[in-house]
Amino acid sequence: MATKNQAPEAAPELLEISELRTRQKISRAIFAGVCSANGWKPVKRVSEEEFQTAVKQFTEAPMDGKPRKKKEAD
């Protein structure tokens, strides 16, 4: 049973992705690619962390879409 002293965890703030693009200075080309890769429309609202993760995954992905081979350590 919860007590009155315990505050519920706050949900992350959801912001429009176009606002996050401006805040994080993401180029239009990268923004368009992230939106396309995730099926996002311009009015989509996500947390800042989710947006950063999506941008990182997009920018670090290989351009040809093929999975990268892991290099074996000698």
Image: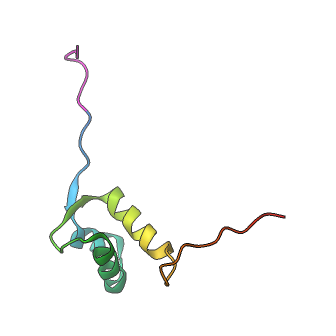
Write the residue at 35% across / 57% down. Answer: 49
Residue 30 at what x, y percent from top left? 37, 81
> Where in the figure is residue 52, as x and y percent of width and height?
38, 64
Q: Position of residue 16 (x, y in %)?
A: 19, 66
Which segment is the magenta one? Answer: 1-8
Residue 47 image point, x, y percent: 28, 56
Compared to residue 1, the image places residue 55 above or below, namely below
Q: Quadrant of residue 73?
A: bottom right
Q: Could you tell me which residue is drawn at 84 percent across and 64 percent down?
A: 74
Quadrant position of the N terminus in the picture? top left
Judged left or right of residue 25, residue 10 is left
Rendered position, 63 above or below 19: below
Give the residue at the far right of this rendering. Answer: 74
31 within the magenta span? no
Helix, strand or loop: magenta stretch: loop
* Residue 45: quadrant of the picture: bottom left
The front one of 63 and 43 is: 63
Total numbered labels: 0
Decide if residue 37 is on the left or right side of residue 71.
Answer: left
Q: Residue at x 24, y 18 (%)?
A: 5
Outermost residue to the left = 43
What residue lies at 15% left-to-right and 70% top-to-bottom? 43
Of 2 and 71, the residue lying toward us: 71
- Colour convention: rainbow
Q: Looking at the rendering, which quadrant does residue 7 occupy?
A: top left
Q: Is residue 27 left or right of residue 66?
A: left
